[in-house]
Amino acid sequence: MPFDKEMGYRVVESLKEVAARHNATLARVALSWVLGRPAVSSVIIAARKVEQLEDNIGAVDLRLSDDDVQILDAASDPGVPYPKWMVLQLDVAEDPRSKVLYPERYANGGPWKDLRGTR
């Protein structure tokens, strides 16, 4: 799985910004943010020290503002990854190869009716 390092840096910087607002650790903010996702029912935490465990558990009580969530969402948004961008494009794009290879077929608008957008 490819990893976008620049996005990783953006996420960490955004976590730092939000953590500073709440006087919290990056881990606590990250866990709170993940817990607030509608599709997430649980998170797995890990700690080597009791202090880390307590900090992780404290994420349940951290309330992020809408602005905080928006900052973190924007920093972590991957866009539309492949192949979804390609599939979405099929509904609006037209393959130009036919017109280039067989221009005579398209002299009068082409032999096929364009059914895109009629669903």
Image (tube, grey):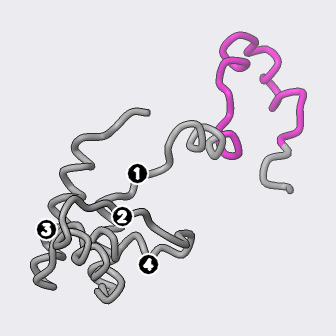
Is residue 100 magenta-colored? yes
Q: Amino acid at mark 3?
A: Lys
Earlier residue among tags 3 and 2: 3
89 or 1, nearer to the observer: 1
The residue that disc 3 covers is 16
How packed is label 4: few (under 14 Cα within 10 Å), some, or many (20 or more)? Answer: some
Rendered residue at 67%/18% (across/down): 97
> Mark 4, mark 1: which one is toward the viewer?
4
Rendered residue at 43%/75% (across/down): 35
Check contact, mark 1 vs mark 2: CB within 8 A.
no
> Mark 3, mark 2: which one is toward the viewer?
2
Residue 72: % across, % down: 30, 68
Residue 9: % across, % down: 18, 50
Q: Amino acid at mark 4?
A: Gly
- Whether residue 85 is situated above or below residue 102 in the rendered picture: below
Earlier residue among tags 3 and 1: 3
Magenta residues (range)? 90-114
Q: Residue 36 shows which numbered tag?
A: 4
Q: Amino acid at mark 2?
A: Ile
* Real-space CA distance between mark 4 and mark 1, rounded to the nearest whole angstrom: 18 Å
Quarter holding the N terminus is top left
Residue 25: % across, % down: 15, 72
Check contact, mark 3 vs mark 1: CB within 8 A.
no
* Real-space CA distance between mark 3 and mark 2, rounded to the nearest whole angstrom: 19 Å
Earlier residue among tags 3 and 4: 3
Describe residue 86's horizontal placement relative to residue 73 as left or right. Answer: right
Check contact, mark 4 vs mark 2: CB within 8 A.
no
The secondary structure that most of the magenta stretch takes on is loop
